[in-house]
Image: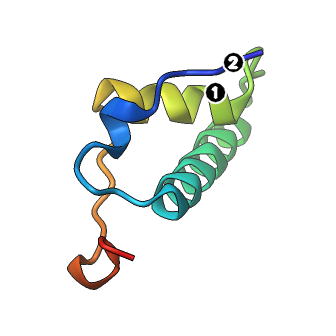
Amino acid sequence: MFNPDLSKVLKNHLSRYSLVTATAKRAREITDEANEEGEIITEKPVSLALDEIIDGKYVIVEPEEIRNI
């Protein structure tokens, strides 16, 4: 089971909701890109998306007014 340490990602007052939404959006993009290119993905798209976010390849921009909710 994939259980990464999210403290690095959530350290800048990023909400868990934003993290989940961004991960789902990126996973959908990964799936769509693979389908367009005719590739078969062996790893789960959510795992790939979360890896990209943790590695800093995909940055989540959150509006200031919801950061402290």
Residue 57 image point, x, y percent: 30, 32
For label 1, count other residues whose C-alpha is less than 10 Å away and answer few (under 14), some (14-19) or many (20+).
some
Q: Are marks 1 and 2 in contact (CB under 8 Å)?
A: yes
Residue 23 image point, x, y percent: 55, 48
Residue wearing tag 2: 2
Q: Quarter of the image for the C terminus: give it.
A: bottom left
Q: Name which residue type carries label 1.
A: Ser
Of 64 and 28, the residue lying toward us: 64
Q: Residue at x 58, y 26 (%)?
A: 48
The tally of labels here is 2
Residue wearing tag 1: 47
Residue 26 image point, x, y percent: 54, 48
Residue 53 image point, x, y percent: 40, 36
Of 6 and 25, the residue lying toward us: 6
Of 9 and 49, the residue lying toward us: 9
Q: Which label's residue is closer to the chain start, 1 or 2?
A: 2
Q: Residue at x 27, y 85 (%)?
A: 65
